[in-house]
Image (cartoon, rainbow, N blue to C red):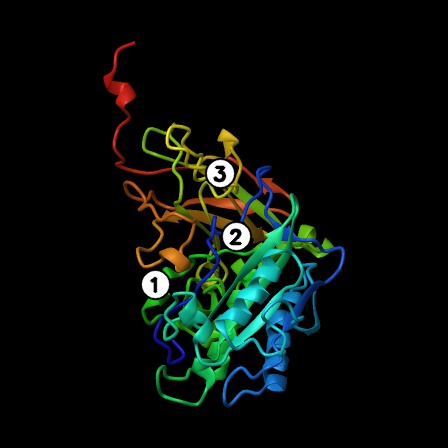
Amino acid sequence: MGGLAAIALAAAPAFAGGPLLVRPDGQPFAWSTASEVQYRTDNGPLSGTVDEAAARTRVTGMFDVWENVATASIGYNRAGFISAVGAFSDGDVSTAAEYAAVEDDCFNGNQSPVVYDVDGTILIDLGVDETSIIGFAGPCSGNAANILTGRAVMNGLFQDGQAAPVQDIPAAAFDAAIIHEVGHFSGLSHSQVNVNCINPCGADDLAGLPTMFPFLVSTTQGTLSVDDIAWISRLYPAPSFSTTHGTISGTVFFSDGQSHAQFVNVIARPLDTGLNQDRTSAASVISGYKFRAIHGNPLTGDPADPFGTTNAAHIGLYEIPVPIGSYTIEVESVDAQFVDGSGIGGYRIAMPGTAPAPIGPIVVTQNAVSSGNDVTLIGTAPRFDQFEGQ
C-alpha cells in the first residue's frame, strides 16, 4: 500500500476506459504528434516548502514518465511561464480571477497551463474539496481531429509541510498523482485493473495497478503499468508498437446472446507461467467505449453528447491493446466507488447478471487483432421479445 489511504483522483468528464474522449468517427481525441505538446508552468511556488524551480523540475519529470514510453511517440516541451491574459499579469496564478482568465485562454485554444494552487483558493472557487483533491487535468480545446490545448492544476496543500487543513503526503505519492493527471492531459481515461487494491493488496497486484486507476493507493503508481503503456501507445503509436503489441476484441452480450451490454469492465490477463503475470501485466477497457452514451431527446430539446460514434456495431464492443502473448478475458462491474471525477466509462451502470468464467487462451501476435472473443453474461433479465407473438 505504500502507507497511503486511498485518495480519489479527479479527471475531466471521462467518456471511456482507455481514451478519455472519442471522436464521432470512433477514433480517440489525441494530440498531434507532428511536434511536441507545448505546455506552460506557473511562475509561483507550489507551496510554502516547494518553490517554483523545484516545482518546475518535478513537473518536467512527470511529463517525462509518459514521453519515455518506448512504444509511444508523444513528446512534451515546457514553452515557458504561463502567458499573461486578461486579469492575469503577474506570473503567479494565485487568485480565482487569475485562474479563470488563464483557463478561458486554454479553452480558447491559446495555451496549455500547469497551475500551482498554493493554498486551495482555486479549488475552493471551483467548488472542489481542497482537502481531498490533489489535482486535476484534461483537454481544454480541440478541432475535428486533435486536442489543441489542455490544463492541469496541482494542489500545494498536500506539499506545504503542514498538518492542516490537510496532512501532507510523500513527494513520491504526490508526483504519482500528478503523473496520473498528465495521463488525462494526454487523452487517457481511468482504468480498472486489480480493483482489489482499493484495500491492502500484494506486491504483484500493486505492480499491475495502473497509474490511471481512479484512486491513489501506492507510490508504485508513479511507474506506468502494462495497461498505461499499452493505451498511451495505442493513442500515440511509435513504430515499435506494431512489432510488440496486438489487440484483443469482442462484444459483451446479455444472456440472450443478442443484446449488447455497455459499460462492463473487460480485462485481458496474460496466462500465468508461475511469475504471476496475470496480476502484474493485465490491461483493460470498458465495453462500448467508442459508442456515444447520450443521443439527445428531440422532445425535450436535450442535446446529444458530442463524443463517441453512433455506429451500432460499436455497442458493447471492446478492444484491448496488449503485448504479444497468450491471454484470458474476464469481465466485471465497474466498482461502485468510481463515480463523478473518479468515474470509468462516463456513466456507472452495474454489470447485469454475473460474469462467466474467463475465456481463452487467446493468442496475440504482432500488429494483429484477435477478434470475436465475445462474452455472454449469465442470468440477466430476458428480453420482452420472447414473450411476444409475431
Coordinates of residue 355 in the picture (x, y in percent): 32, 44
Q: Determine which residue is flagged by label 2.
A: 20
Q: Determine which residue is flagged by label 3.
A: 291
Q: Could you give the CA–CA distance between mark 1 and mark 3, rounded to whole angstroms?
A: 28 Å
Number of the label disc, if any, that sits on residue 345: none
**Circle 1 residues within 10 Å: few <14, some 14–19, many ≥20:** some
Question: Residue at 29% of width from left, 20% of height from top?
Answer: 385
Coordinates of residue 151 in the picture (x, y in percent): 57, 64
Residue that extends furthest to the top in the rendered view of this protein = 390
Q: Nearer the viewer, mark 2 or mark 1?
A: 2
Residue that extends furthest to the left in the rendered view of this protein = 387
- Secondary structure beneath label 2: loop
- Secondary structure beneath label 1: helix
All told, the count of numbered labels is 3
Q: Determine which residue is flagged by label 1.
A: 196
Coordinates of residue 234 in the picture (x, y in percent): 61, 52
Compared to residue 102, the image places residue 234 above or below, namely above
* Quadrant in which the C terminus is drawn: top left
Note whether residue 234 is visible.
Answer: no
| Residue nearer the viewer, 225 or 131 | 131
| Residue nearer the viewer, 166 or 230 | 166
Coordinates of residue 326 in the picture (x, y in percent): 53, 50
Looking at marks 1 and 3 on the same chain, the residue that comes earlier in the sequence is marked by 1
| Residue nearer the viewer, 127 or 3 | 127
> Hey, which quadrant is residue 84 in on the image?
bottom right
Please, what is the three-letter code of the amino acid marked with disc 2? Leu
